[in-house]
Image: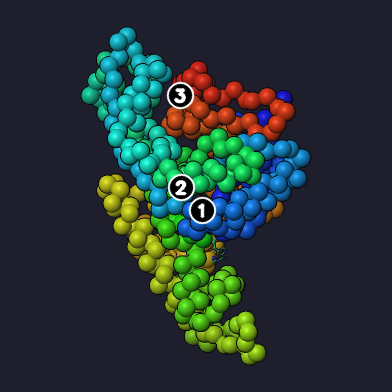
Amino acid sequence: MDEIVVGIDVGTTKVCTLVGRVESEKTARIIGVGIEPSEGIRKGVIVDLAAATQAITHSVERAEQTSGLEITSALVSLAGAHVSSVNSRGAVAIPGGVIDGSDVMRALDQARAVAIPHDREIIHVIQRGFTVDGQEGIRQPIGMHGYRLEVEAHIITAAAATADNLRQCVSAAGVEIQNFVLNPLASAEVVLTEQERQMGVAVCDIGGGTTDLAIYVDGNVWHTMVLAVGGNHITQDIAHGLRLPVTQAEEVKKQQGHAVRAEIGAEEYFSIRPFGEDYPVRINRQDLAHIIEERTAEMFSLIMQEIKRSGYDGLLPAGMVLTGGTSALPGIKRVANEVLGMPVRTAQPENLVGLVDRLNSPAYATSVGLLQWALTMQEHDLSSGRARKVRRAKGEKNMNLDGIKDWIKRLLP
Ligand SMILES: Nc1ncnc2c1ncn2[C@@H]1O[C@H](COP(=O)(O)OP(=O)(O)OP(=O)(O)O)[C@@H](O)[C@H]1O
Ligand SMILES: [Mg+2]
């Protein structure tokens, strides 16, 4: 029996639907790809239901054509400034004196019982660590002896109405949402190494309209956040600064852009012909780099502020891993390194199998990450681990990944 996983990354600039055939616990062969320009989505949030529905529908249809399968349900990426997160603790007594999976679940249920306003929806409940009888720093409590289990959980919530709008668009495209996955968590699945997660690392996916950040410490998610800035802001600045239409500013950014002015020669010029003009305009590349550098540096100082605000005051020894379309900007690594004062590397999906021509680019980290998420069923994310079904295509039996037995098995070493 073939097992199929499907992810839909609803980004600000593109919608990307991927269909994967599970080949092993860690790999899915990509058999369907549908990449379409986004419409009706701004800063990761739907602002025009009809336009967004159409873009999502086109993307899904294209992935159906390439895979030859009908897509009925999928994991869907979620971002936007409406996403927020809180840390919470849950504590339970262990009647039998030995901790089992249901105790962990009860503790997590306690943790998620924090007062969440009715206009917000819980997207993820992620375990950050356990305490057994006052002993902190327990990673895996199942099987341990103890009388009191505490869990520290990271709870990610979204504005319920905004999530409902996305649900409506995806459902109008004929697809049921199995689970939302927060953008940076999906991206982290493909760009972070286990060693980096253990050491302490931040993943930063800079797309068109959002910058998605997740911090990992001791192998677990420590903090997540979504900032409403991205590559589109750089484009806007270029459009204003050089008085160009936005579409041309975007071209200029991709063809000539550089984030470090000092790396561009003073005599480097390029010509463009703005729409509606009969004459070409000569532009100094240093001027362009100056505009980009200012905005990029500002973005990273905002990111640094957020990292400090997350309450994590230790070092991130593995630094930051940059991904997302904007990470393809030449020089961005240097700016990030200078502003953040930590090691920075850029990353994109690697070692893909199947229809991968366009996917080996940082812009597809979230898209590929959704498939990876479906595969690995992150053991620390019990909210989706319990409910997630990763079966997509009609006419094929559901893969039975939900149910307590399965996730307990995953929790056991
Ligand atoms: N070579 C490049 N240089 C600079 N910017 C680039 C380059 N290639 C792509 N970009 C920028 O990347 C952005 C798109 O990235 P991506 O596809 O990751 O965004 P998205 O997922 O659609 O949006 P979001 O995640 O913010 O909702 C655009 O702003 C685009 O201009
Ligand atoms: Mg994105």
Write down the quadrant of residue 294 in the picture: bottom left
Of residues 323 and 197, the one drawn nearer to the viewer in this rendering: 323
SS of the residue under disc 3: helix
Disc nearer the start of the sequence (2/3): 2
Front of the two marks 2 and 3: 2
How crowded pointer 3 is (Cα within 10 Å; few <14, some 14-19, many 20+) is rated as: some
> Residue at horizontal 59%, vertical 41%?
171
Respond yes or no on whether mark 3 lies under 8 Å from ligand 2.
no
SS of the residue under disc 1: strand
Front of the two marks 1 and 3: 1
Task: Give the CA separation, mark 1 to mark 2.
Answer: 7 Å
Colour style of the rendered protein structure:
rainbow
Task: Give the CA separation, mark 2 to mark 3.
Answer: 32 Å
Respond yes or no on whether mark 2 lies under 8 Å from ligand 1.
no
Residue 263, x across and y down, in percent:
48, 76
Horizontal side, residue 9 vs residue 354: left or right: left
Residue 47, x across and y down, in percent:
50, 56
Of residues 82 and 97, the one drawn nearer to the viewer in this rendering: 82
> Residue at horizontal 45%, vertical 24%?
411
Horizontal side, residue 161 vs residue 176: left or right: left
List the residue tagged with mark 1.
Answer: 46
List the residue tagged with mark 3.
Answer: 411
Task: Give the CA separation, mark 1 to mark 3.
Answer: 36 Å
Badges 1 and 2: C-beta atoms under 8 Å apart?
Answer: yes
How crowded pointer 2 is (Cα within 10 Å; few <14, some 14-19, many 20+) is rated as: many
* Label ID, residue 162: 2
